[in-house]
Amino acid sequence: MKNEEQRKQSTERAATAERRHDRVAELDARVFQGMARGREANIEVGRALNELKKILGHGKWLRHIAETFASCGIKLRSAERYMKMATQADAVSKLDNLSNFKPATDRGAQEIRSASDRAQAEVGAASGHKLTKAPRRADGIYQLPLRMTGDQQNAMDVLRKLPDWPLAAKTIIALLKRLWVKYRIVDKNARRRP
Amino acid sequence: MKTLLLSRDYREAAVRQEGQLADPSHVHQTLDEDTRVIVPDGRISAVLLCDAIPPARHKLAYELWRTVGELPSNRATAVGVPSLPRLKSDGTLGKRQGVPRKVLEILKGQGARHGMLGYMDATPDQPCHKTTLSIRRPELLDGNRPLIELVDALYRQHAPTFYAKQQAEVEKVPCWRLWNTVFSTIYIAKNFRTAYHTDSANLRGAMSTIMPMGKFTGGELILARWRIAIAYKPGDLLLFDPQQLHGNLPFEGERLAAIFYCERRIADCGK
């Protein structure tokens, strides 16, 4: 029983280490791709290096830079400069995202807004509900609160590591889209033009 | 050509602006000369080519295309209003949604119209088809063939990577494109000031090209995420990524914009 638990733990440790290696390789590749793109991509390179440093820790990080990138022109000083640029850019972005866009105040905009408000009130009165606009969300990772057995979660971990994961993710989203139509959350005929 | 390297990203703040009308206070920088815009991750976001279209070409296009006559009743986000169910004469709600009638009346008064030329990909209701406007009035396309081919050549020259992707897509279905170009469709917007929107029906990873026409002042295109305005005028051509939020400032005069693009699922039309 104890042996089995130990074996399970060592398998998990191996899987975690492998994931870490995969991520390091992915970030290394991103640094090389950024270098190939020239100076416009310095911030992107800096972001990848920042994440690498976090994963590897200080000691391994210095060795990793020397072994992997020094021969291709990224010395420690340059790496630190890119990392600083990325940190500064991200800090600026955080502030920028707190900035507000004021509503348009020209006559045309005001006319459209007031006509739209009247139309919403009319439709609201006809339907018996107050219409409110759903807040717009940024694209990104969405975590589904799915209850799964341990085996299912393990299988999911394996699936996410496969090279075919992007295709599998698209299939899952296609299934979700069918469910949204089935439960009338979205209109199947809805379609936007440029 | 000038290269503008952007370092500030207003993504989170900008995304909340979808469906809102643009205001001059949103702009930190205005472009009015040949410029290539590079965003912080190194991608090309837009290329502005000033005086790239000879006057004879864009003036002919203006005369032919200013006759588009459909109200933009199916473009609620671009108009800047929520898509609402239509109210029937008995006061109940209809099944179809769109721009509210009250707003359409205002747009009608402003002379806002639009039209589609070329080919559309399949929707749940309709298979791939040529637009009604192109069938009824073939001269709108035929009369502007040299212009469309010129825009194609400029796109190939100034954004070759994006062009190659679009070309690979349209070459799967050669009969669903405009002559030998990479465009399947042209959208004409007349006196239509758009609120911030993205062009979700366009091919991903490709660029759209916008050519303004007419006699107008104002009407700059704003890319909300980068807080830049593109002050283009008749004869200019703008290549840009239509998946980023964009909208126009108000304008005075008669203004037409032609958007040359490739429909998102056009390659499926061959199946």
Image (tube, coloured by chain):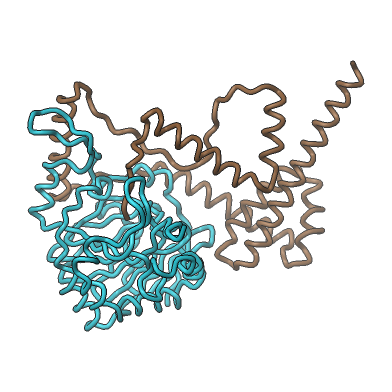
Q: How many marks?
A: 0
Image height check: is A34 above or below B126?
Answer: below
Residue at 39% in and 63% down: B262
Q: Name, please, the residue furthest toward the top.
A: A1
Position in image of residue B1 (x %, y %)? 42, 77
Query: Residue B235, how many percent across, how many down?
Result: 26, 77
**Is B124 displayed left or right of A80 in the figure?**
left
In the image, farthest residue toward the front:
B271
Write down the quadrant of residue A150 in the picture: top right
At x 60%, y 68%, the residue is: A38
Image colour assigned to chain A: brown
Query: As rendered, which of A48 and A60 lies closer to the eye?
Result: A48
Q: Is residue B133 above or below residue B149?
A: above
The image shows residue B113 at horizontal and vertical percentages of 16, 58
- Closer to the camera in the image, A9 or B167: B167
Q: Is residue B130 above or below residue A148?
A: below
Instruction: Tell me the shade of chain B.
Output: cyan
